[in-house]
Image (spheres, grey):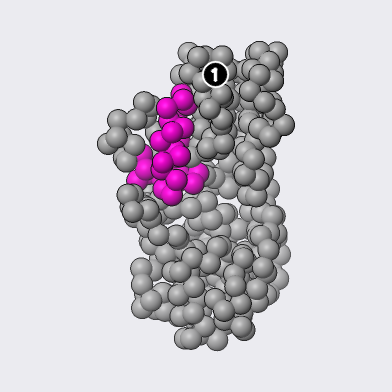
Amino acid sequence: MNVLLLTSPSGGVYHFFEHALKKGLTAFATVYTQSYIACNSQSLVRYCRQNQINWIITFNGYFFSAKDKALFHANKLPPLAVWLTEEPYHTTSSLDVLTFATVAWSVESGSTAFYKERSTPISVSYVPLGYDDQSFYPAKGNDTPQYDLAFVGYPYESRIMWLKQIEEHFSLKVAVVGPWQKDDLPSKFDHIATWLPPEKVGTLYRQSNIVLNSYRSGSKEIEAKSINNRTFEIAATATCQLSEYRSGIRDFFSAAEIATFTNQETLRTQLQELVENDDVRNQYALLSYKRVSEHTFSHRAQQLYKELNSYSS
């Protein structure tokens, strides 16, 4: 199978997702890569013909022009497979993509039901993102962690509230990564204001006793149920994770493997136990690490390939 991985003009974290997905797909298919920005509709058609491309794969696909869409409809381009990774927040754009894509996967299980209810032209399967095992792995030594707690993410309102609760009730050395404003973040926390590449995020997790994982609220139309890729990434570093609860977490991890909270009180209670009890913290870290091995990007790539291959045959 010849696959064209069409890289997104969105940039940012997608560069790392694309690299990890390409590495995984290469074990099963011949993978070509093109930047969408670097080609127009006709050059894309020519490229696909010259290289006998069987499938085009991309993240989201919100960037395609009207001319591109017409070419997909007319079968002038190979069939399109999209991985919808901004769910459930861009459903209008996703609904448009589903009119010209052939296969679609979503990282949010609530979205798959939403699209089914609307009888979209194609069905959407739930496939969460994975983790890159070259960036997220356990510490190799017994170095003393630099931080009691770390958090990586955008400063959504609920996350600001969680961190302020921690600042008010605990005396911890905390590192926060992301574009936070000065007024949103307790001044005594260490702040890394720029996004870090995955390998540096992995290093931060390994340097921390506990990693906090929290979520953006769902959209007005869809209740968000699924876990994020950070859930797998944190577990892969064998670091204790304290995660905001989502029902989908139990599809992957038991209550003995990842500690969860639902409100300010359970956040404080759970964090208190993890801070005070090394054995409990280490047990969570070990059990979640043992569970996560089947959720690498390579495993996801194999899953996507099998679906495309069965569709083609």
Residue at 53%, 27% in the rendered image: 66
Quadrant in which the N terminus appears: top right
In the current view of this chain or complex, which residue is farthest to the left?
Answer: 117
- Taking depth in this image into account, of 267 and 178 the one nearest to the observer is 178
Does residue 131 appear anywhere in the picture? Answer: yes
The residue drawn where x is 31% and y is 40% is 113
SS for dot 1 = helix
Range of magenta residues:
85-112
Looking at the picture, does residue 187 appear above or below residue 154?
Answer: below
In percent of width and height, residue 31 lies at 67, 26
Q: Depth check: 238 or 88 in front?
A: 88
**Residue 123 among those drawn in magenta:** no
Labels in figure, total = 1
Give the camera-side residue of 47 and 241: 47
Residue in the picture at 39% in, 69% down: 261
Going by the numbered disc 1, the residue's amino acid type is Leu
The answer to whether 44 is drawn above or below residue 188 in the figure is above
Residue 89 lies in the magenta stretch: yes
Q: Residue at x 69, y 55 (%)?
A: 197
Q: Which residue is mark 1?
A: 71
Residue 51 in the figure: left or right of residue 217 = right
Q: Position of residue 227 (x, y in %)?
A: 44, 53
Position of residue 6 measured from the top left corner of the image (x, y, whole percent): 63, 31
Rendered view: 201 above or below 63? below
